[in-house]
Amino acid sequence: MLFRLSLTAALAGSLLASAAEPQVRIEKNTSYLPEGRAEKADLYLPVEDGKKHPAVVIIHGGGWAGGVKDAKREINIGTTLAGQGYVCMSIEYFLHSAESEQPCWPQNLHDCKTAVRWLRANAERLKVDADHIGVIGGSAGGHLASMVGVTQAKDGLDPAGPYGEYSCQVNCVVDMYGPTDLVVRNKDLTPLRATLAENPELYRQFSVTTHLDKDDPPFLILHGTADKTVDLSQSEILAKALAEKGIEHHLEVIPGAPHTFHLQPKEKDLRPLVIAFFDKHLKPAAK
């Protein structure tokens, strides 16, 4: 089932004006993982108004082996959404390293899910509406954001803790040019520490499309036609699979856009689309 987002010219203009100069507070390097973990998170907080706000977890890209929480894309997303009344949490997570024997999967996904739980555990302090949390990510972060949305305890991919008393489910997902079917993509991934031929079941587990069911949250998928890293076909495969399951979704194809872009690529301003999507699913009064 496709969803449609429409904005009047006046509303779009208002959104862009406020998103261009957002009044936000930033808390850098917040600990959200167990003691001993070095990874941190940056919080982008809206102006204090005494009200509860929905929240969004931001997951950076970098091939599951690199990337930072405060890159240009993540700052752009955090400030844009916080300016629209969202509590945003841009996270670091466990990355692949050739110098470590510990595989990054599924610890990277566990960290992303722990971020969702952490927001719920700290909802009172942060004025978070714990019933309305979304997730967004680009490239490898888009893959992990999608996996947060579609995997559940039954898949064996929820972390036992910390904050195990809280749900790690989200209400909606924005996937920015993330790989989705790693078997069809047919490329060996160093972070998985095995080739596709050696361990096809691992690649299947690592694929978003493996875990879809009719109860999964709505998706907004963004992908450029000039992407040379993750082919547009990966997002088309996901959109088709979502349609087959009856999951609400929209695939926005941006002509000429390359692999990495934020919410304001030169080809098209995506802020109205993304803000309207999150407003629809995370702000009950806006539905």
Image (tube, helix red, strand yellow):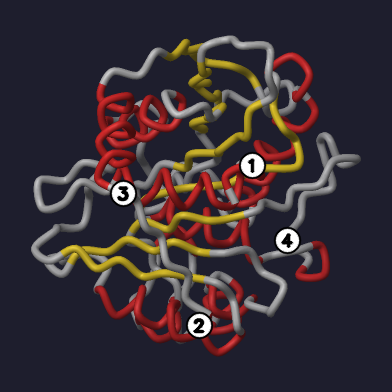
Along the horizontal axis of the image, is 31 left or right of 188? right
Which numbered disc covers residue 285? 1
Comparing marks 4 and 3, which lies closer to the viewer? 3
Q: Position of residue 123 (x, y in %)?
A: 75, 25
First in sequence: mark 3 vs mark 2:
3
First in sequence: mark 4 vs mark 3:
3
Q: Identify the residue at horizontal 65%, vertical 36% (top origin).
A: 115
First in sequence: mark 4 vs mark 1:
4
Distance of label 4 from label 3 (alpha carbons) = 41 Å
- SS at badge 2: loop
Judged from this view, the residue extending furthest toward the right is 165
Which numbered disc covers residue 198? 2
The amino acid marked with disc number 1 is Ala
Distance of label 4 from label 2 (alpha carbons) = 22 Å
First in sequence: mark 1 vs mark 2:
2
Q: Nearer the viewer, residue 107 or 178?
A: 178
Comparing marks 4 and 1, which lies closer to the viewer? 1
The amino acid marked with disc number 3 is Thr
Q: Which residue is mark 4?
A: 157
